[in-house]
Image: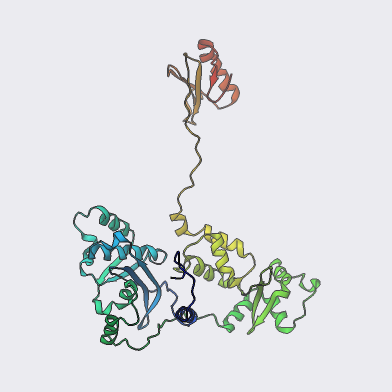
Amino acid sequence: KLTETRSNFNWTEECEKSFNSLKQALITFPVLTYPRTDQEFILDTDASNEGIGAVLSQKIGNEECVIAYFGKSLGKPERNYCVTRKELLAIVKSIEHFHHYLYGRKFLLRTNHASLRWLLNFREPEGQIARWIQRLQEYDFEIQHRKGISHGNADALSRRPCKESCKHCTNAEKKFGMETDISVKGLTTEDIWSSSEVQKAQLEDPAIRPILERKLNSEDRPSRQEIAPESSATKRYWALWDSLHLKDGVLYRKWESDDGSSCRWQLILPKSRIQEVLRDTHDSASGGHFGVMKTLSKTRERFYWDRLRADVKKWCRECHACGARKGPKTRTKGRLQRYNVGAPFERMALDILGPLPVTTKGNRYVLVLMDYFTKWPEAIPIPDQEASTVAEELVRPWISRYGVPTFGSRYKF
């Protein structure tokens, strides 16, 4: 209401309470879980007269953990849809929203509308429904019906929020035992990169080991003579000595912006872990197969290593999934033009066809000539594409009979 046109910006206690509740919900940990590529995705969708909602989750262990939510209000034409069309709209919009998670993977689609179990088996679909079904053909999913009582997660997102004094919502909360405040539980991916394992990997890296050993023994920067026998990668790490620090025995790089407003700790990544990190930041479901710059920015948020940009660029260029989706580069073509001619042999066109199999006379190419006005063609065999050969054959059979043309498509006389 505060941002509506022709309304005064009046910050009330209710606004302050809502703002603080929103901040608390955003910073409360844990809320959502990270997606796992080894688990099947579950998509719950629902639609009401006001909007559509969806919940993307995965079953990790014995608990179903939420990955992301989606909700959208319906426009005036969409509110006139029938129930089946609204539920189908919720499926289409939800799958499109979570495309980067679901594309290329088999997932479970759960809905409380029983007729949608035969969604892909509609007989002779027409119009909008046919286009929606065609759009869903590129996804691999199994539809499962779930009763409305068990479908409250997606159902709540599709409903229009009511006032606190709404008796219908109060009765529903009492019926399903939801009077108390229920916090959203989520599991986070367990960090398998313990400090001891990372330190061990850094010590096994020949480029990082000399820097880490000197950092563990002393904070004094080694001289240029001491570092001279080391590799070029080690020397580049040595140039960053003042920004390298130890945290729990692990080497980090402290990056600061130019104006000093932001600071970031980047783990000095050993060479043995580079592929694993690039696979997570680019190939995984949360990576999204972004381009070089976005993948580079995402990687730099947590890691740093020598030749980082070159490795990211090579990884994105050699990604099979990105190459399969990326279409061929379109070449810029010249616009078609109309050539006006008023007499025979005023303008001619010529081109060379070949190379072809060598004839008994040693010819491998064909010089093709055509008059623009009469469309008279001639084909002359030639042994090569040399300018002297083309000029000789052009003069002997063509110009000697028809004269010199005023214009030429490739050559001017």
- Snapshot quadrant of residue 395: top right
Q: Quadrant of residue 311?
A: bottom right
- The one of 392 and 401 positioned closer to us in this rendering: 401
Q: Residue at x 58, y 20 (%)?
A: 391
> Which residue occupies the foreground of this view, 241 or 362?
241
Q: Position of residue 170 (x, y in %)?
A: 29, 84
Percent of width and height locating residue 280: 50, 70
How was this image coloured? rainbow
Quadrant of the rendered image containing residue 121:
bottom left
Residue located 29% across and 88% down the image: 177
189 vs 232, nearest the viewer: 189
Q: Residue at x 30, y 81 (%)?
A: 166
Q: Tell whether 211 sits left or right of 11.
A: right
145 vs 330, left or right, is left
Q: Quadrant of the N terminus?
A: bottom left
Examine the rendered structure and indicate whether residue 371 appears above or below residue 240: above
